[in-house]
Image (cartoon, coloured by chain):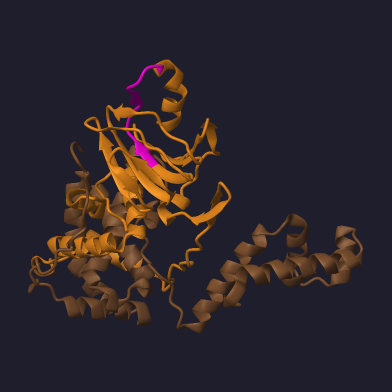
Amino acid sequence: MIKHHPNESLLEQFVEGSLPASISVAIAAHVELCPCCQKKTQALEEAKASQQFSDAAPLALDADMIQLMESIALTDDVDEVHDYIQPTFSYQGRDVQLPRAIANIDRTKFSGVGKVSRARLLLEDGELRSSLLEIEAEGEIPEHTHTGFEITLLLDGDFSDESGEYVPGDFIWQDGRHNHSPRTKSGCLCFTVVSSALHFNKGLSKLLNPIGNLIY
Amino acid sequence: MIGQQQSVDCNVKSGTRKAVQDTPSQALSDALVKVATSRDRKAFAYLFEYFAPKIKRFGVKQFGNEAQAMELVQDTMTSVWRKAHLYHHDKGAATTWIYTVMRNASFDALRKMKSNKEEHISEDIWPIIQDSQTDDEGFKDHLQTAQIQKYINKLPPAQRDIVKGVYFQEMSQEQLAEHLNIPVGTVKSRLRLALQKLRAELGDQA
């Protein structure tokens, strides 16, 4: 069962559309996997809608508004919407379905160091970078902290760190106060959003730079 | 965005929302359904009068200027007119649906301001249709065609050319053989392989 969720304030900002795109994608993917958060976002959308739209009677429209209204309804055409076909994603010999928000954004090919490889999502979003991260069986990411923050959404496989084990759908938010060294027994696929380069705590930091660059 | 943003539980709070008496919910939903089913311009005018000024007010807050706020009104109300058929009244209030349409348009507009790119990722973050409508035969056929098209495009090029030639350009197998400069037997075997694959892909739906 999914144990880690975005908190209330994050979900609220998500529903308002006020979060950066990468974080919105991470939360949308979690919500797709988590029926409980689906209910919550629906309730929040209802609440926001009442806030915006409940007050006052209709106002009189000015000339610009009337013109706009008439131009919109000029034709009877409707927008055809095609059903969404979920593509299959294969990694380490497994077939999985990526959440829609992640699947539909273009990404680079996978490239890696050791057991860790990543494909970056081509999503311009300031300092935020988001990637699909694949770790092979018995792989780990050396202990590190974050100057900014890191979101990890486990999509498939197993994954654990000092705080315990995670299941697909778990939404993990780490910042400067945490340090962790995630590892996987049988291999895993994650979606990550990272706001700045990682900081490795244990020696050989120069040696670990390639992996730090890879993950950011 | 500092501090712990992750939560170890997920409790849906219920009963915390007050019923809003001022909102003519039923009338708004009825109007939206009329727009969808009979392209009713009077119903649309009613929706427009109710929502457009409120969307503009939201836009002014969001973008800080009137011109972009009017663009948001245009984007949102255009979607309301053209996508009303995607609204299901049994899944929620018209106000909620129109709020999500407005939120999506506003998100894409803000992205465009920041990255100067024309994209509509809001559609993937907050899909307006959550599931397909299957009771309408025509709609289903249309969906199935789109899906078959997609599978055809995934076939190896040699097989794809044959399928497209036979089913879309309506060429005979002999014509195709000549056109592609291959024996008729090869056309037949490629077609058989391609159809096997398509059947397997479509599985129980076909």
Magenta span contains residue A197: yes
**Residue B136 against residue B98 in the figure, above or below:** below
- The part of the chain drawn in magenta is A192-204
**Residue A41 against residue A215 in the figure, above or below:** below
Q: Position of residue A156 (x, y in %)?
A: 44, 51
Task: Evaluate whether residue A62 shows in this view.
Answer: no
Quarter of the image for the N terminus of chain B: give it.
top left
Q: Position of residue A158 (x, y in %)?
A: 42, 48
Q: Position of residue B179 (x, y in %)?
A: 86, 61
**Residue B32 against residue B13 in the figure, above or below:** below
Q: Position of residue A38 (x, y in %)?
A: 28, 62
Left or right position of B147 against B7: right
> In the rendered picture, chain B carries what hue?
brown
> In the rendered picture, chain A carries what hue?
orange
Magenta span contains residue A67: no
A211 or A28, which is in the foreground? A211
A42 or B116, which is in the foreground? A42
Left or right position of B57 against B205: left
A144 or A8, which is in the foreground? A144
Hey, which quadrant is residue A205 in on the image?
top left
Task: Evaluate whether residue A103 shows in this view.
Answer: yes
Give the total number of marks visible in the rendering: 0
Left or right position of A159 against B177: left
Quarter of the image for the C terminus of chain B: give it.
bottom right
Who's the residue at 56% across and 46% down the image? A92
Who's the residue at 33% across and 73% down the image? B87
